[in-house]
Image (tube, rainbow, N blue to C red):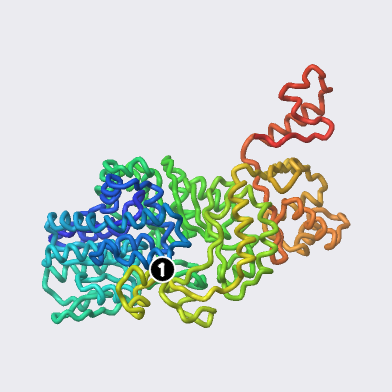
Amino acid sequence: MRVLLVNMPWSPIDLPSLALGILKRSVDERVPGASATVLHANLEFTDWITARTGFTADDYEYYALSSYFMGCGDWVFSSALYDDPAWREKEFTETMRTRLNKARMKMSHELHAVVPEFVDEMARRIVAENPDVVGFTSTFQQNTAALAAAKHVKRLAPHIRTVIGGANCDAEQGAALHRNFDFVDFVVRGEGEAAFPQLLTALGEGSDLSKVSGLCRRTEDGESVANAMATSPLPPATILPPDYSGYFERLAASVARNWVEPKLVVEGARGCWWGEKHHCTFCGLNGSFMQFRSKSPDVFYDEIMDLARRHKVLDMYVVDNILDMGYLSTVLPRIIDSGYDLRLHIEIKANMRRNQLRTLSDAGLIYVQPGIESLNNRVLDLMDKGVSGCQNVRMLRDGAETGLSVSWNYLHGFPGESAEDYDGVIGQLAALEHLDPPVDLSARIAIERFSPYFNRPELGFDGLRPEAHYRFTYDLPEAELYDLAYVFEAPERGITEPTVSALNDALALWKKHHADARLTHTDLGSRIVLVSRRRAFPWRTKELTDPFELALFRLLDQPHAPAALLRKAGARVPGHGRTEADVEALLTGWVGEGLVFTDAGQYVHLAPAAVNEDLLRLDFMRHTHAATAPDPDAAHTGAADVDTASGRAPVPA
């Protein structure tokens, strides 16, 4: 049996498809007499479209990722799905004219007009391969491209079995897709590495398809039937490593080779151990199975090393929704000792401690996504995130100190939030400009299928409708769109425009000034030296020498309330004579100087430890000039940059 697996646009071009890599291995190893190959149609499209338009890497990223919640990428390929190069152009333009600039609008229409030709070419190429089965993966904005290709293949070669699976096919989404598009023979719902080989085996043997969990199939009279989905997730030991044969070779021959640095995609775990206990209210990830399960440390380590050796690629994207904390003491130390200079990207929880972050950094983690979402404790409670605003700020600080790039988003629009929840944070954002800002400005939350906000209207959202882009993309009634859609419209909740504008203005300044901002501290035992270069704070250097203040600052490495600070500092500095009011006054002053962040009655300091030689050089110069009388002839040497009377120096460049 010949199986062709197809990765249509808008799958990212810098990553091979993990889903198809796993399915290829599953077919080759688990289906007797079958072999699978992968067609990287996303790369084919890149070469095809750049030969015809001024399409760029930024354009691809926009349609693949940035425009996801507007559905631009799916609308582009709806013209091929419905055999109409002008499919619902008016509706698209009217809906998007306030959301797209002229260049994006123009490019969307250009793509919409020409992609039917590309899909037709891909379909003819697929048919020429003479497969028995062609399988399409559909995640994010791949749905219309995959459907359009399946339709064209079926038109050209009705005998070829068409199958679609992926995140866009989970649960009721997959059932809706199957019953509304009769050119799709089968839809695989849930974890495909078990169901897909079972389907192929049953097709080869002519056996009963009703036993394939989650499969959507057709009866002899053409009726769509959906088998019951599996009741438990796959054990991690049954999850095969991916086979990426052909991807890197095809990328090397593509114009996209000049656009991206390719990465390997690896998977250690599925599900979310936090979500099993506290499902974040806005999160629709993990669909059918939230249960957390992870591969054994030996298996995961061997997979990572094997992929690195096989493909000679050190950049790796770990797709786990959350890090298995056991890997901190098992997999990561082995990576550190391996001698491989890996560069890893992974999602973590924001309450990880500095020593844990340092382990990540030492193992080659350069990019972490801790799911911060807000810096206010009350809003985080509404999300059921299990962290505080001060813990999230501490995460940003410790990420900077350990050399990790922290990728995060600021979200708003939660039922029950108020302007007061944001006012205190907005007033302190200028103090954070030396830390990694959010990827973009704050966004109102989207209501995602499978999230508590979708499943439990009592949490604040009812009367949900599929987002507008589904209506101008698909020719389906509202009830069918409701089952097909992943993102939904809902009445706006939470803060209103004045607060949103104030928040985004402050975030915009953060992003603008981040590259030039600096705040660090060096603990020299009897004193702590702080160096600052931030637009909102005029001071440049500051020293703490009072034993009680030193104790307080060190305790503020972790979030504390004033009463706890007084008690703990008192144990370290007996006879200090301070009261809780004195501590609060000192903390208020430090907040005003941008040294400390406060939220919900807790405080945490903002200064990463200096990780370069600037402060050591500053300290050396200070002592040198204190011990040596000024030389008038040296007034314009480098040494004269220190004011010996004050012991202060300009901020190092």
Query: Is residue 569 in view?
Result: yes
- Who is closer to the viewer here, 248 or 257? 257
Total numbered badges shown on the rendered structure:
1
- Residue lying at the far top of the rendered structure: 633
Q: Residue at x 67, y 52 (%)?
A: 430
Callout 1: SS = loop
- Who is closer to the viewer here, 8 or 15? 8
Q: Residue at x 42, y 74 (%)?
A: 450
Where on the picture, by quarter, is residue 4? bottom left
Query: Is residue 306 in view?
Result: no
Q: Is residue 47 above or below residue 639?
A: below
Residue 72: x and y in percent read 38, 61
> What residue did someone put label 1 on?
286
Label 1 sits on what residue type?
Asn
Q: Residue at x 64, y 70 (%)?
A: 378
Where on the picture, by quarter, is residue 296? bottom left
Q: Is residue 134 above or below residue 213?
A: above
- Locate residue 67 relative to residue 219 in the image: left or right: right
- Who is closer to the viewer here, 619 or 511? 511
Quadrant location, the N terminus: bottom left
- Locate residue 431 relative to residue 348 in the image: left or right: right
Quadrant location, the C terminus: top right
- Locate residue 371 relative to residue 553 in the image: left or right: left
Residue 364: x and y in percent read 47, 45
Residue 135: x and y in percent read 22, 62
Mark 1, residues whose alpha carbon is within 10 Å: few (<14), some, or many (≥20)? some
- Who is closer to the viewer here, 216 or 24? 216
Residue 575: x and y in percent read 87, 55
